[in-house]
Image: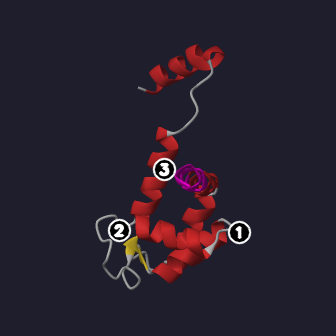
Amino acid sequence: QDRHVRHMTKTLVENIVGQGQNLGKAFCELDPERKYKVSKNQFGNALGTACNHISKQAVDFLWAAMFPDEHGADIENRTVDWRDFMDQVAHYAHENRPPTPVCLQPRKRQYDLLQR
């Protein structure tokens, strides 16, 4: 049971990572005044726009994950800063990216040194 939940969560987040640009664009379209605060409904709409086959349970799970310390609290009427969500997605993508193949490491290191 626990392995299945971890696998589904990983699949969901990797799907969101893959659609990161579309998700950022969807959030920008939902928030034209750039207040950066979105409701749960707007959050679900942005996720649905970026990832066509996302379920309501997935939206509920991601919404609850934005409030980790509030298990019994009413989180339905709260708002979140969508930039924080996008930052968490980017952090996950960076932490879980595949390692650079050995044949490319010297070239990547040279590129990284040039960027400094």
Label 2 near label 1: C-beta < 8 Å? no
Sequence-wise, which precedes: disc 2 or disc 3? 2
> Which segment is the magenta one?
1-9
- Residue 66 vs 2, above or below: the answer is below
Q: Quadrant of the C terminus?
A: top left
Sequence-wise, which precedes: disc 3 or disc 1? 1
Sequence-wise, which precedes: disc 1 or disc 2? 1
- Residue 89 spot, x, y in % from top left: 49, 54
Q: Amino acid at mark 2?
A: Phe
- Residue 79 spot, x, y in % from top left: 38, 78
User: In which image quadrant can residue 35 be found?
Assistant: bottom left
- Residue 37 spot, x, y in % from top left: 39, 76
Is residue 39 in sight in this rendering?
yes
Tell whether position 4 is magenta.
yes
> Disc 2 versus disc 3: distance between alpha carbons?
18 Å
Look at the magenta stretch and give its main secondary structure. Answer: helix
In this figure, which residue is indicated by the disc labeled 1?
52
- Total marks shown come to 3
Is residue 32 in sight in this rendering?
no
At label 3, counting other C-alpha atoms closer than 10 Å, the crowd grade (few under 14, some 14-19, many 20 or more) is some
Callout 3: SS: helix
In this figure, which residue is indicated by the disc labeled 3?
90
Q: Nearer the viewer, residue 102 or 12?
A: 12
Callout 2: SS: loop
Residue at x 48%, y 47% (from the top left corner): 92
Callout 1: SS: loop
Q: Quadrant of the N terminus?
A: bottom right
Can you tell which of label 2 and label 3 is closer to the viewer?
Answer: 2
Residue furthest bottom in the image: 77
User: In which image quadrant can residue 65 be found?
Assistant: bottom left
From the viewer's perspective, is 81 left or right of 98? left
In this figure, which residue is indicated by the disc labeled 2?
67
